[in-house]
Amino acid sequence: MTPVGSGRVWARHRVARLAIFAALGVFTALGQAPIDAWPLAWIGWAVALGLLASAPGMAALATGTLVFGLGYFGFTLRWLVEPFLVDAATWGWAAPFGVSLMALRETLFWVAGVLVARVLAPGRLSGLVLALTLAEALRGYLFTGFPWGLIGHALIPSQLLHLAAFGGPHLLTLVLLTCAAGAVLLARRRWIGALPILAAGVAMPLLNQGTAPAPDPDAPVIRIVQPNAPQDEKWDPAQNAMFFWRMVEFTQAEPRADLVVWPETAIPVRLDYAQPELDIVADAAGGTPVVTGINRAVEGEYFNSLIVLGRGGAVRDVYDKAHLVPFGEYVPFGDLLKSMGVRGLAPSDGGGFAKGAPGRGLVDLPGVGLARALICYEGIFAEEITLPGPRPRLLLMITNDAWFGKAAGPQQHLAQARLRAVEQGLPMVRSANTGISAMIDGRGRVIQSIPLGQAGARDVALPQALPPTLYTKAGDWPVLILVVAGLAGLGALRWRAGALRLDRPGATP
């Protein structure tokens, strides 16, 4: 049995059908930040699942998914044009290709997923839900990963966000797609489809975290600094001194905080030569530890680093960014491609920055405790946050969201920061060169923030850490095992029904 009206859609002229899928992809992407219309994402996925389940063949299924995905990712990742426009004379021509190729890359995971679903469980909504959830997980793991604009991210503005403490981002994806499939079943007058929707409706008020509690008077006070440094001015010698002294002024303001946090690459001099600047910062802090981003070199390798600065300009701790941005901070086969005139967007040569040692992300903050250090891009990888050893007191992110422009990119990055805080049950201190700097508590609530395009500093009491979540203990494994086992079960049912046939539309879900 096919969804109401879907047969007519597939029978229409091919161009009109593809236009419907493209528009549906953009409509579904309205669930992502900054629009945050998560009910529209649910509706969009319900329509998409119904249409894809009724696709008359493998080619139609793949084409429909491809166009739907290009619409979805093209709109969600529209901010990707911004890095190319920082140096428009050099890179502007590549902006549309960069967005298009990245949208295609992400969409191909979905195409592979729906084709697997058609093989294992043709026409079954459950197969599409499980296969798309698995495809989303693989988007974050394979080819260095890029888990941006995940299906489940649409639930971040809803109370269902707090399910991430149990199963991370992929549980959110599974829940949203299951509710969307339930809507399709209801449209087919299959009343069992009401169960996931009712369950989600009951869960939302139960998961309501309310307003943030009053700050603990004994909690350390963190000063978050944002210089408002646009990317095209950040490395300009005529401008970077202004941004540096602006942060110095914020740092020395009274009353003193217990920790001052500057953003990524806030100090415009390599650590090897930065002692005069470090002395100035330490003197302005008056004994308060300062966290800041800076580049450094070790034995001919260059690192994007975070340092903890103590009295007298002494470096107390260092963290080197371990998960780098491909073609941004490093270029695969960099020396070869450099000889061909291809280089990364970040200001580095050859292969770009070197990767920091994996598994080393804890830094000691005097008077505060251990922090899980994250530099910009690293904050989008949920599975990489938890490290062996003692549990940190907080998540500490320094970032340069100026690369992302002024619209969707910074908002989506902040939304993922909220998700990381919920998954770990830990507060996050987030300092950006320009928006959006924030203090986020372990429930994902933004306690205070500095808006995009504004310079400033905020003194905020550090919220309490919550007990370790299930996700911190088990990671993605429970959801992945459930999804793989479900697909294997559907495949076994299909096998028992007869030899696998690759293309049988219209099966009962």
Image (cartoon, rainbow, N blue to C red):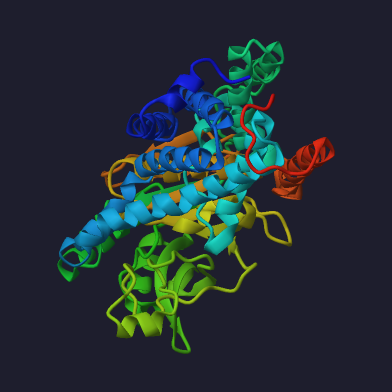
Can residue 257 be seen here?
Answer: no
Q: Residue at x 30, y 42 (%)?
A: 452
- Say if 11 sits above or below 418 in the image: above
The residue lying at 74 percent from left, 44 percent from top is: 500
The residue most toward the right is: 496
> Can you give x and y, in whole percent of width and height, for residue 313 in the image?
43, 73
Q: Give the quadrant of the C terminus.
A: top right
Query: Relative to 357, does residue 470 appear above or below in the rendering?
Result: above
Image location (x, y in percent) of residue 321 = 50, 67
Residue at (54% x, 45% y) in the render: 110
Q: Position of residue 258 (x, y in %)?
A: 50, 52
The residue nearer to you, when weighing 11 against 323, is 11
Q: Is residue 372 visible?
A: yes
Q: Is residue 91 above or below residue 183?
A: below
x 18%, y 63%: residue: 239
Residue 352 as seen in the image, left or right of residue 82: right
